[in-house]
Amino acid sequence: MRKNKEKDHFMSEQPQVIRREDYTAPAFLIETVELVFDLDREATTVTSRLSFKANPDRATGAGDQVVLDGEDMKLLSVAIDGTALAASDYQVDATSLKFNAPSDQFVVEIQTRISPVNNTRLEGLYVSQSAYCTQCEAEGFRRITYFQDRPDVMATYRVTINAPRDSCPVLLSNGNLVSSTDLDDGRHQAVWDDPFPKPCYLFALVAGDLACVEDSFNTMTGRDVALRIFVEHGNEDSCDYAMDSLKRAMKWDEDVYGLEYDLDLFNIVAVSDFNMGAMENKSLNVFNAKYILAKSDTATDTDFELIESIVAHEYFHNWSGNRVTCRDWFQLSLKEGLTVFRDQEFSSDERSRPVQRIKDVQRLRAGQFPEDGGPLAHPVRPDSYMEINNFYTATVYQKGAEVIRMMHTLLGTKGYRKGIDLYFERHDGQAVTCDDFVRAMEDANGVNFDQFRLWYSQSGTPNLVWNGEYDAKQQTYRLTIEQKTEPTPGQVIKSDLQMPIKIGLLGRDGDELLAQTIDLTLGKQEFLFEDIAQEPVVSFNRDFSAPVNVGTTPSHDDLAFLMGNDTDAFNRWEAGQKYASDLLINAVKAFGQSGNADEALGDVDAFCNALRATLTNDDLDKAFRAQAMILPGEAMLSEQLQPADPEAIYQVRQAMRRKIGLSLQDEFEAAYRNNASNDAYSPDATSAGQRALRSVALSYLAATGESVFVDLALEQYRTADNMTDRMTALMVLNDQDHPGRDEALADFESRFASNTVVIDKWFSLQAMSSRTDTLAQVKKLMDHPAFTMRNPNKVRALVGAFAMANQRNFHVADGSGYRFYADRLMELDDLNPQVAARLAAPLGKWRKFDEGRAAKMKAELNRILAKENLSRDLYEIASKSVA
Ligand code: 0A1
Ligand code: ZN
């Protein structure tokens, strides 16, 4: 139990800690679920008919009491086997309904009333614009009706929806449509039946007046699957890319995993109000509209990329998540780590593999490494939680995917596939654990992953240090690697992990002397390579084969050499990042003394020359070159400094950008000119790469401070025929003191005022401006007619972007950024605790900063903890963050 250290005056009750080790199988199973929804915005009636059966695997002495979860609804009636229960026959409280089981097999009928229009949490059944929709993962189903809301209770569902025909012509649920009938009083009815047993978190219902875009996919066994995307009217012309992505994902899963879609219908619905990115409900995926809607003039290349990967991700869940699901929520990475790995590989196959890997690693480093090194660190398979919604984390998703990737590397493509085949063969239709997945990999390949399993239970990012010794006489190279993981909250003692490290040894002429994957298992381990004809340059952890920090920094000469010669594209990029980080970190430290960023940086010509070689190397693809030009971000640099001075980091990074812009001005001007396109916009990876390179060029040219280049950005804004070019120009203008900034922002606002997805870009941009009036602007924008605290996308775009993507202004030394942010989190907590909690992490970074900032950040966390009616969600994050 959690220690009751001090008397908690702020919350009426301590949230309970749920522990993985306490798992017990459910005493009763529910085999079939029949649901009838009488939809009404204020008062929807839900009637459920559940067939219970005692679980043969129940723990002995589990008793005959049935406990169903239920929150925030009115219980109208309960009946067992056709007989209504008297009030004395059951107990109902704020979170449950309890009654005694009459026998080993019985049928329960329950009626509840809920209010979709007042559901601001967006969990359970709610209203988004004109439609009703549901979100049940993780524990939303208990807000619809009383149920055993846990993923190891799998049932088949038959769902009847009754609703007004005019306002809800479209009525959807999981599975197959059984019937559509007109009712009296202008209402109609649809009945849906899902033949596949599923946990209740995969249940979905959508009803509303939506437009539909339709296509089809012919499967590997020749079945035609109808594909439908439902959107608000007027958005029908923005679904092409999502539909195309879906078809490509379906084909890829057949080709690469041998997995075929299992129903004749696959529906996607795009809604504007959604807590997360999207949801994989069986055959009825619900999406945040921003990850579906895209046209050349409304979506950037990055948006197209995200749509492709998220559509694929949700589709892939049909097997990795739905057909085989999680036994309990501690096993979340079973489906999420695996499905992220699958979507990353899909994108790699569809686009540039090295660029995809670079982006995935950037995301891991930006989101997961700080989490793993901070107060919210937890293993890929957590041991405890207060609120499961707080565990949809970068660790469970991104690090979870890295763990799958390492198994793929250790076993090879064929061995991995053997393991996957065995996993689906063994566990189809079951709710299983991460351990079951690893066992399938072991059994299919005859290997032992006992040590490897630690990746699931140990938190923290390992740090690797390597050392090389060349023996010219023996022509051998001895590589010594040491690994160490720092303690994390609640986990002080760390063990050595097994990990595959890909390395290359390069000759000075650029020849690859050796390329190998080594199997690191010890705390300190030596590897001897023979027949090495010259002292090599080491390319370490190629392709980021293990998700670790590498503490060894090669010489600047070696880094420049690797930037130009490494045969592993990822490590070419990595060498540039390491080189830049080293220069920037040293300069930030020196800036403390001089206060002059240019002086602190000193001579960076060698680095600029290495960048020039990459920029002008026409053998490299343009998307890669664009990535290679981008310096590590401010947050990334903060991670490497203790304490981090956000203003110094900002100044030094800007100065570096200016130096690079000046040094490579001719090359950037040429890149800008030569990469203009006269063709109509196409979102494909090659065209996107060309635009990315041109964007990088413009942004460095503007960094020189020459006003002609700001004029050039304004010109690009005015003539842009696609959103990528428009946003690039606007991002440059956004940081300037130039009349063009106001002109472009005003134009953007009036152009896209009625497009709720696009206007969020306008909010974010202003929230991310490095200008010192940004906080004042953000406060003002909260009164903009398009802004509302009730829409998660709006909150994330304006308030979230300010704290998460504007280090300079959020951390302004007087603490005004922190205060503003804490106020918003508390305001949001009363509306949507899940989203409030997900946004709270930035305040928990106080350990990274100087005493003044740290004290102010902690004070805000304490103010949040003292809030009346603080949610369990935000309490968990704030209390862990302040500790
Ligand atoms: N399973 C979804 C993401 C998701 C998770 C939680 C949600 O509500 C708490 C909603 C969606 C995915 O991985 O895409
Ligand atoms: Zn997922």
Image (cartoon, helix red, strand yellow):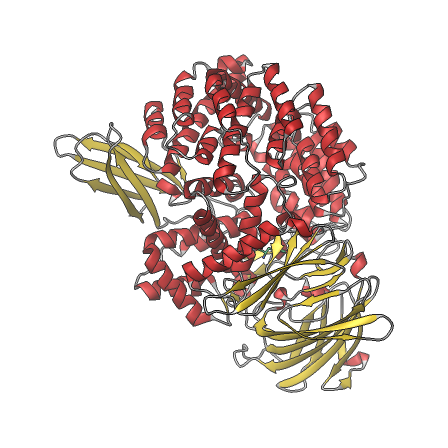
Pinpoint residue 618: horizontal percent, then vertical percent: 39, 29
Pick whichever, 801 or 61, lies toward us: 801
At 48% from the left edge and 48% from the top edge, which residue is drawn? 347
Q: Image quadrant for the N terminus?
A: bottom right
Q: Is residue 227 above or below residue 677?
A: below
Q: Is residue 249 above or below residue 777?
A: below
- Furthest toward the left, the residue is 473
* Image quadrant where residue 96 sits: bottom right
Residue 338 visible in the snapshot: yes
Number of dots carrying numbers: 0
Pick whichever, 675 or 689, lies toward us: 675
Pinpoint residue 773: horizontal percent, then vertical percent: 72, 24
At 37% from the left edge and 45% from the top edge, which residue is drawn? 545
Pinpoint residue 821: horizontal percent, then vertical percent: 71, 37
Q: Image quadrant for the C terminus?
A: top right
* Residue 510 shown left or right of residue 324 in the figure: left
Residue 376 visible in the snapshot: no
Q: Is residue 96 above or below residue 606?
A: below
Pick whichever, 379 or 748, lies toward us: 748
* Image quadrant where residue 565 sits: top left
At 46% from the left edge and 48% from the top edge, which residue is drawn? 350
* Image quadrant where residue 440 sits: bottom left
* Residue 698 shown left or right of residue 143 in the figure: left
**Ligand 1's quadrant:** bottom right
Pick whichever, 343 or 16, lies toward us: 343
* Residue 442 shown left or right of residue 127 in the figure: left
